Image (cartoon, rainbow, N blue to C red):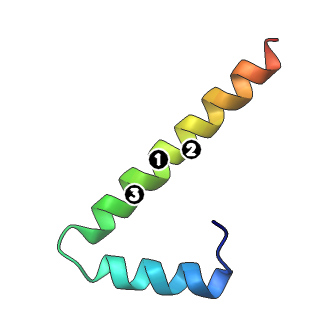
Amino acid sequence: MEFTKEQLSELICKHTEKENGLQDLMEIMLESLMVSERREYLVSIR
């Protein structure tokens, strides 16, 4: 599923209003970055 920048911004704003919302978003972003790094690394060693 792909979102526009405006849709992402709206989702982020709504999520940060929740208790621990900012912490949850940071965890999601860091996990996504780590998955992307692993995927790129695995592709590069083939």
> Residue 41 got which mark?
none
Where the N terminus falls, by quadrant?
Answer: bottom right
Q: Position of residue 32 (x, y in %)?
A: 53, 46
**Which residue lies under the disc numbered 1?**
30
- Outermost residue toward the left in this view: 19
Q: Amino acid at mark 1?
A: Leu
**Which residue lies under the disc numbered 3?**
26
Crowd around label 1: few <14 · some 14–19 · many ≥20 (10 Å): few
Relative horizontal placement of residue 17, taking residue 33 as reference (left or right): left
**Mark 3 and mark 1 residues within 8 Å of each other at the beta carbon:** yes
Q: Earlier in the sequence, mark 2 or mark 3?
A: 3
Crowd around label 2: few <14 · some 14–19 · many ≥20 (10 Å): few
State the separation of the CA atoms marked 2 and 3: 11 Å
Q: Position of residue 45 (x, y in %)?
A: 79, 12
> Residue 33 got which mark?
2
Q: Amino acid at mark 3?
A: Met
Q: Amino acid at mark 2?
A: Leu
**Mark 1 and mark 2 residues within 8 Å of each other at the beta carbon:** yes
For the point 58% across and 84% down, the residue is 7
**SS class, disc 2:** helix
Crowd around label 3: few <14 · some 14–19 · many ≥20 (10 Å): few
